[in-house]
Amino acid sequence: MKLDSAPLEISGISHTEIELKREDSNDFNLTPAIAPSVEPVIADSPQKQQSALVVFGTTFVTIFLAEIGDKTQLSTLLMSAQSHSPWVVFIGSAAALITTSLLGVLLGSWIANRLSPKTVEKSAGVMLLIISLMLFWDVFIIH
């Protein structure tokens, strides 16, 4: 293979303008030729769709289980019983949860663009450890 010509990026020849010409059984010569441009085909792969579905499912199950029986659900239950307007309470609480989730996603995206995943993971671990220690202190030391 002849390697005595300039690299394609330096010579100004794009990858779509290359044509292989065989000169003999063991020698190839890269020469510029006008070739029709090839448009890349971008298709949604099943793997990409599956990973989005997996992320959605994991997020749904995690948040659903975390929210069952928490103070938000109990507050919504009490407001619904007190107001006798369950659908209005549902719409208000759903809008509030969507808004807080949006803030979490935007903040997470902002953090992901500025910090490495390892740093985010370690910071989350430290924060959860601090919260655990505070809860431990509150339950066992104060009472």
Image (cartoon, rainbow, N blue to C red):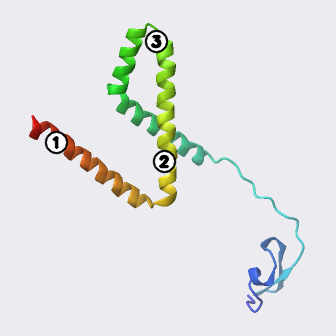
Q: Which mark is residue 57?
A: none
Identity of the amino acid at label 2? Answer: Leu
* Relative vertical location of residue 102 with respect to residue 89 in this rendering, above or below: below
* Left-right relation of 125 to 115: left
The structure residue drawn at horizontal position 81% and vertical position 78%, both measured from the top left corner, is 13
Task: Say what secondary structure mark 3 lies in.
Answer: helix
Q: Quadrant of the C terminus?
A: top left
Task: Between residue 54 and residue 25, name the one nearer to us.
Answer: 54
In this view, 76 is above or below 143:
above
> Where does label 3 land, which residue?
86
Q: Quadrant of the N terminus?
A: bottom right
Mark 2 / mark 3, whichever is N-terminal: 3
Q: Which mark is residue 136?
A: 1
Are the residues flagged by discs 2 and 1 in contact, CB closer than 8 Å? no
Three-letter residue code for mark 3:
Pro
Q: CA distance from mark 3 to mark 1?
A: 37 Å
Residue 133 in the image: x percent, y percent?
Answer: 20, 46
Q: Mark 2 falls on what kind of element?
A: helix
Snapshot quadrant of residue 6: bottom right
Label 2, label 3: how many angstroms apart (C-alpha)? Answer: 31 Å
Residue tagged 2? 107
On screen, residue 2 above or below 47: below
Left/right of residue 17 with respect to residue 42 in the rendered view? right
Q: Earlier in the sequence, mark 2 or mark 1?
A: 2
Q: Give the class, few, some or many, for how many residues have Cα within 10 Å of label 2's Cα (few <14, many ≥20).
A: few
| Residue 56 can be seen in this image | no
Q: How many marks?
A: 3
Q: In front: 53, or 105?
A: 105
